[in-house]
Amino acid sequence: MLHTIRIARPLAATPRLPLFSSLRPFSAAAPAAAPPPLAPADPRYSLGERTLHEKLANQLQATKLNVADISGGCGSMFAIEIASPLFKGKTLVKQHRMVTDILQEDIKGMHGIQIKTSAS
């Protein structure tokens, strides 16, 4: 299921925040068995895509992760598809909340984000 958050702000009034901020620890119980390591970020990623990819991969133990800038390259809207063992047993809303909590500071500088999650 695809979840889109649209932030209603005029483009000119939106402050341009850098997409890199310090990582904050994410507290969640570790799965019984460690998931296989995720391949490094796609070398074709933009700086913004790579930053989001690294944050999510590290904090959610992602087994599948794809980040795409769908704004035409300006970094104002992203589509994220992620699978994680930490999503197991959680509702779709809670899975999306986990993603948005990690990207909270980055989302402030975006116009929208699409999130697709699944448990692995």
Image (spheres, helix red, strand yellow):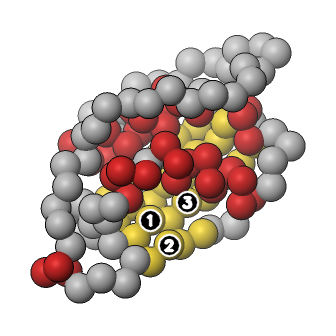
| Callout 1 crowding tier (Cα within 10 Å): few <14, some 14–19, many ≥20 | many
Q: Is residue 84 visible?
A: yes
Question: Picture coordinates of residue 79 (x, y %)?
Answer: 45, 60
Residue at the location (33% across, 61% down)?
108
Q: Amino acid at mark 1?
A: Ile
Horizontal placement of 22 versus 11: left or right? right
Q: Which residue is mark 3?
A: 115
Cβ atoms under marks 1 and 2 closer than 8 Å: yes
Residue 31 rendering spot, x and y as whole percentages: 77, 21
Secondary structure beneath dot 1 equals strand
- x, y percentage for residue 67? 42, 49
Q: Is residue 70 visible?
A: no
In the visual, does 89 lie left or right of 117? Answer: right
Q: Mark 2 or mark 3, which is nearer the start of the sequence?
A: 2
Residue at 25%, 40% in the rendered image: 20
29, above or below 86, in the image: above
Q: Amino acid at mark 2?
A: Ile
Spot occupied by residue 15 in the image (x, y as percentages of width and height): 17, 66
Residue 8, picture quadrant: bottom left
| Residue bearing the label numbered 1 | 113
Q: CA distance from mark 1 to mark 2?
A: 5 Å
Cα gap from disc 3 to disc 1, whole angstroms = 6 Å
Alpha-carbon span between mark 3 and mark 2:
9 Å
Identify residue for label 2.
Answer: 5
Query: Mark 3 and 2 residues: CB-CB less than 8 Å, in contact?
Result: yes
Label for residue 93?
A: none
Q: At label 3, which amino acid type do we have?
A: Ile
**CB contact under 8 Å: marks 3 and 1:** yes
